[in-house]
Image (spheres, rainbow, N blue to C red):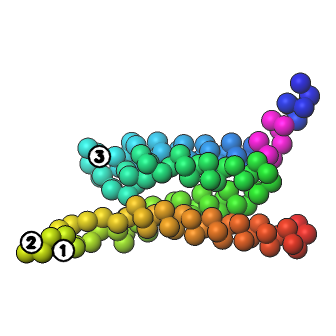
Amino acid sequence: MDNLLSFLRSKRFRFPLITALAYGVIYLVIRQFFFIGRTHHLYTLDWSAKNFLWLAVLISCVPMLFGWYRYGLISTLGYILGLVVGEVFGPAMRVLDPGLPPMPVHDGWIISILTFLGFCVVGIAYEIYLKKRGE
């Protein structure tokens, strides 16, 4: 029982829990304000909350269980920034069929994922750098 209580009080439990709760708040905000049918629907936020958010939670939280606490913060910030960048730079007009006028498309989802993954790589590199430095 003492082992369980010490684990629940440790950083290895608290930091992933706080990160997962932060993602939960992100999901609730997106669900409340930006889903389809809402007044301010935003495609990238809607798509990401439905299709990618829970994978991002795992990608951010699992390394924290092994002591990579800064990685979780960096990847969570990357997820948030990816949503913003994807929504801003995602909409485009593209010719999908010759002879027809350009049609609107939205590539925000791929921009969001690539931004998140880029921040994950930065987080991994930072954790390795700190480990080599001895922190």
| Residue visible at 85% across and 30% down in the picture | 4
- Tell me where the magenta segment starts and ends, as one range: 7-13
The number of callouts visible is 3
- The residue located at (62%, 60%) in the rendering is 75
Residue 6 rendering spot, x and y as whole percentages = 88, 35
Instruction: Determine if the magenta segment contains residue 12.
Output: yes
Query: Residue farthest to the left?
Result: 99
What secondary structure do most residues of the magenta stretch adopt? helix
Name the one closer to the observer, 26 or 4. Answer: 4
Mark number displayed over residue 36: 3
Q: Amino acid at mark 2?
A: Leu
From the viewer's perspective, is residue 4 above or below residue 101?
A: above
Which image quadrant for residue 78? bottom right
Earlier-in-chain disc, 3 versus 2? 3
Q: Which residue is mark 1?
A: 95
Pick the front one: 86 or 97: 97
Q: Residues under labels 3 and 2: Cα distance?
A: 27 Å
The correct choice, above or below, for 126 with respect to 17 in the image is below
Mark 1 residue element: loop
Q: Is residue 76 left or right of residue 28?
A: right
Secondary structure beneath label 3: loop
Circles 1 and 2 in contact, beta carbons < 8 Å: yes
The three-letter amino acid code for the residue at tag 1 is Val
| N-terminal label among 3 and 1 | 3
Return the residue at label 2.
100
Place of residue 51 in the rendered image (x, y in percent of width and height, measured from the top left):
43, 48
Residue at 48 percent of width and 62 percent of height: 113
